[in-house]
Amino acid sequence: MPNHYPDKAVCPECGWVHDFTVYPVVNAETDPELKKKLLNGKLFTTTCPECLNTFRVIFDCLYHDPARKLMVQFCPPEKTETYRKIFDDLNQENGIFKDYTLRIVNGYYDLVEKIQIADNGLDDRIMELCKRFTAGNLSNKVSYELYDVKFFVRDDGVRNLALFSEEGPQNVLELHDELYELMSDLLKNIDIGDLDPYIVDAEWSNKAAEKIKEADSKPSQEYIS
Ligand SMILES: [Zn+2]
């Protein structure tokens, strides 16, 4: 089965139509070059041969890392439910994907972030809690309205969180292991069974944080007796 098919791209500047190759599946193990193109954005970019305008072409793309047992489906929001059903089927008790991490993202940078988190041996659920904690801690201390926090790894391997306003990146902070460990411990104390299994984002972390709060406010058995 070929992992790509021809499509057409329409230049938003001059309207010229040219050939463009779509890759619906990127397998990190069998096609590391394609993974590189995904991470540097070239997979979703093309240049118009007529006016040389470079622009983004977005298509549904499944990132599959068999070694890490990870699948991330990148798709527009209106297709989320379609892929949710597909993942539900993959997720069956006795299926070969039952111990896979399955995620759905709607943004290109969300896709890149999920891959970087996995490549660093980290858990995206813990990472969302780290991002939430960092945002909450800083929202009163910065002069801009915090719009997003993203995990990324510098070329020298240092793990960072980048803070964004709606205008773009504003600050970069180092992600300390202590924070990650703390959030990991907090997550162990709650039951996340009823949280969204595929969409792990800021909303997911808000719900997880509520559960952490509840677990924290419950009096322990010792106090009751
Ligand atoms: Zn053009």
Image (spheres, rainbow, N blue to C red):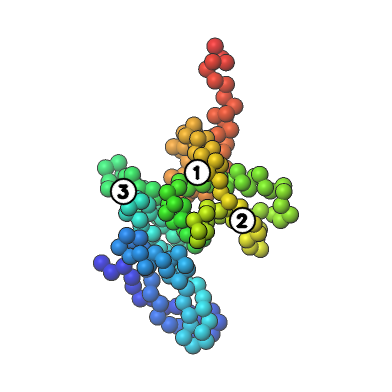
The reply, left or right, for residue 163 in relation to residue 181 is right
Q: Position of residue 116 (x, y in %)?
A: 46, 56
Residue type pointed to by label 3: Phe
> Disc 3 vs disc 1: Cβ atoms closer than 8 Å?
no
Question: Mark 1 sits on what residue?
Answer: 126
Q: Give me the residue at 27% from left, 46% from top.
A: 95
Front disc: 3 or 2: 2
Q: Position of residue 82 (x, y in %)?
A: 40, 55
Local packing at callout 3 (Cα closer than 10 Å; few below 14, some 14-19, many 20+) is some
Q: Give me the residue at 57% from left, 15% from top.
A: 223
The reply, left or right, for residue 179 in relation to residue 59 is right
Residue type pointed to by label 1: Ile
Local packing at callout 2 (Cα closer than 10 Å; few below 14, some 14-19, many 20+) is some
Between the C-alphas of marks 3 and 1, the distance is: 22 Å
**Residue at the far front in the pictured view:** 156
Local packing at callout 1 (Cα closer than 10 Å; few below 14, some 14-19, many 20+) is many
Question: Mark 2 sits on what residue?
Answer: 172
Q: Position of residue 34 (x, y in %)?
A: 37, 67
- The answer to which of 162 and 129 lies nearer the viewer is 162
Q: Quadrant of residue 43?
A: bottom left
> Disc 3 vs disc 2: Cβ atoms closer than 8 Å?
no
Q: Is residue 132 above or below residue 54?
A: above
Q: Give me the residue at 45% from left, 61% from top.
A: 75
- The answer to which of 129 and 204 lies nearer the viewer is 129
- The answer to which of 24 and 63 lies nearer the viewer is 63
Q: Give me the residue at 56% from left, 46% from top.
A: 176
Query: How many numbered circles does the render carry?
Result: 3
Question: Mark 3 sits on what residue?
Answer: 97
Which mark is first along the chain, 1 or 3?
3
Between the C-alphas of marks 2 and 1, the distance is: 19 Å
Q: Can residue 110 be seen in the rendering of this structure?
A: no
